Amino acid sequence: MINAQKKILIIDDDQRHLMTASEILEEEGHQVITHNLAFGATNLIKHHKPDLVLLDINMPALSGDRLMSVMRDEIRGVPVVFYSSNDEDSLRRLVTECGADGYICKGSIIDLKNKVSRFLFSASKASVTVKLGADALL
């Protein structure tokens, strides 16, 4: 793996999807933290400071899109990507409405690997740009 190990938080109430995605991303060299409830997610993000959050939409009590709307201001700078079996049209709409950084459809291992790598690369590139911009002000 070219990049240093990245930390990914996966929030999903479906234990099977949680474990499968975790194993796939760990095989790619990432450190993976899993959580099976919407509740407590904001504190987990603040505590672990992940490089990327994969957030399921269809969870009981508090759906992923509602959670995203609630926590967005509190977790600025942490990319959040919807990870769901919903259709792509509804995911695109929810990304726009909730301010998520994108989406990944469940079901394709290749898509999961490729899109996570792409989101991590984009996030690290944005971080370097911000750091360079801040240094330029000094």
Image: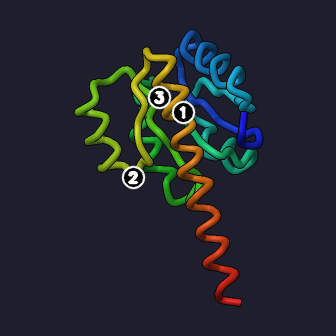
- Going by the image, does 17 lie left or right of 33? left
Decide which of 49, 128 is in the foreground and name it. 128
Q: Provide residue 46's location: percent of width, then percent of height.
A: 69, 50
For disc 3, the marked residue is 56
Badges 3 and 1: C-beta atoms under 8 Å apart? no
Residue at coordinates 45% horizontally, 23% vertically from top-left?
Answer: 60
Residue at coordinates 62% horizontally, 54% vertically from top-left?
Answer: 124
Looking at the rendered structure, the secondary structure element under dot 1 is loop
Q: Amino acid at mark 2?
A: Gly
- Going by the image, does 74 lie left or right of 47? left
Question: What is the residue that sits farthest to the top in this orientation?
Answer: 16
Instruction: Report, in whole angstroms, how far the alpha carbon at label 2 lies from the one at label 1.
Output: 17 Å
Q: Provide residue 123's location: percent of width, then percent of height.
A: 57, 52
Question: What is the residue that sits farthest to the front in this orientation?
Answer: 2
Instruction: Report, in whole angstroms, how far the alpha carbon at label 2 lies from the one at label 3.
Output: 15 Å
Looking at the rendered structure, the secondary structure element under dot 2 is loop
> Of label 2 and label 3, which has the lower sequence position?
3
- Where is the N terminus found, in terms of image quarters? top right
Q: Amino acid at mark 3?
A: Asp
- Going by the image, does 120 lie left or right of 4? left
Say few, some or many: other residues with alpha carbon within 10 Å of mark 3 (under 14 / 14 to 19 / 20 or more). Answer: many
- Going by the image, does 107 lie left or right of 26? left
For disc 1, the marked residue is 38
Say the numbered circle drawn on residue 99. Answer: 2
Badges 2 and 1: C-beta atoms under 8 Å apart? no
